[in-house]
Image (spheres, rainbow, N blue to C red):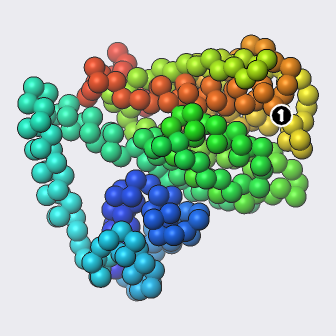
Amino acid sequence: MNTVQLHLQNLHLLIEEAGSLSALARQCGYGKSASLSQLKRRLESQSGDDSARGIRPSLAAKLEKSMNKRKGWLNRDHSKDLEKARAAEQTAQETENPTMPSENAVSFTAAAGDRTATVTRNTSETQITVSVNLDGSGCGRFDTGVPFLEHMLDQIARHGMIDIDITCKGDLHIDDHHTVEDIGITLGQALKQALGDKTGIRRYGHAYVPLDEALSRVVLDLSGRPGLVYNIEYTRALIGRFDVDLFSEFFQGLVNHSMITLHIDNLRGRNAHHQAETVFKAFGRALRMAVEHDERMAGKMPSTKGTLTA
């Protein structure tokens, strides 16, 4: 294992310990996760280069200090220590739950403890990094250049109890289209990755959300089959300077890449802002229900087919 591979392995351990890349960035005092995302991408691209330097000493010291690690921790191989710790944790869980089959306990705990993902997607139109933690506290951090979209994304995070960190540099000098659609695509990819094989989850989610005169319903299935039914007649074309047509592009991109079946219906509403907000709040709450662990489904696939990924 060369220096870059060792540093990348240990960076993954720090991300796992912190809960997500964005959480690690905050622990280190960064307002955004972009710097650590770039570091991770660089290490991944240089992993085969034995002459590459890895993480510079000053940043390594900052990471170690922020995560309460001994000086030089990043330069040591901790894979065996990690295996021992996980084995000890598994033994402790089996002791606490003697009636639960060990394979179910391991599957359920692994899914609960590793439902994070960071996805970076770069094109000539947008450069995006999305981090999600499905077992978060509803914290949203956004830097996209599209304020009303950020307001809506915050509804997903808060009402879905999902930590979402999104940075995007897009071609806003043209319009918001590429930015909004590509954020939907990248968020969908992150959700799919964080969900893993979906063992033990509820799978289905639904929510009705009112806001004054507006009422929306969202129903979804983490089916592994992308499908969008989108019934919203906005009462005006623009909310501020935001084109409401772009919301369908956002959800289409999200559905196609998260492999979710999603039905969205705005049942009534006169205020376009209220219409949009009820949709995003309902989506967050439906998603929260669907990704939750079902104790009675622990270790089982919520499908008679045996898989929700194919």
177 with respect to 144 (left or right): right
Q: Quadrant of the C terminus?
A: top left
- Percent from the top left, x then y, of residue 268? 78, 14
244 with respect to 95 (left or right): right
Q: Amino acid at mark 1?
A: Val
Residue 109 appears in the figure: yes
Q: Nearer the viewer, residue 277 or 126?
A: 277
247 with respect to 13 (left or right): right
Residue pointed to by mark 1: 244
- Percent from the top left, x then y, of residue 217? 65, 17
Residue 130 appears in the figure: no
Residue 265 in the image: above or below residue 145:
above
Residue shown at the point (17%, 64%) measured from the top left: 81
Residue shown at the point (79%, 17%) measured from the top left: 213
Residue 285 in the image: above or below residue 149:
above
- Percent from the top left, x then y, of residue 63? 41, 74
Q: Quadrant of residue 113?
A: top left
- Percent from the top left, x then y, of residue 305? 36, 18
Residue shown at the point (33%, 39%) measured from the top left: 112
Q: Quadrant of the N terminus?
A: bottom left
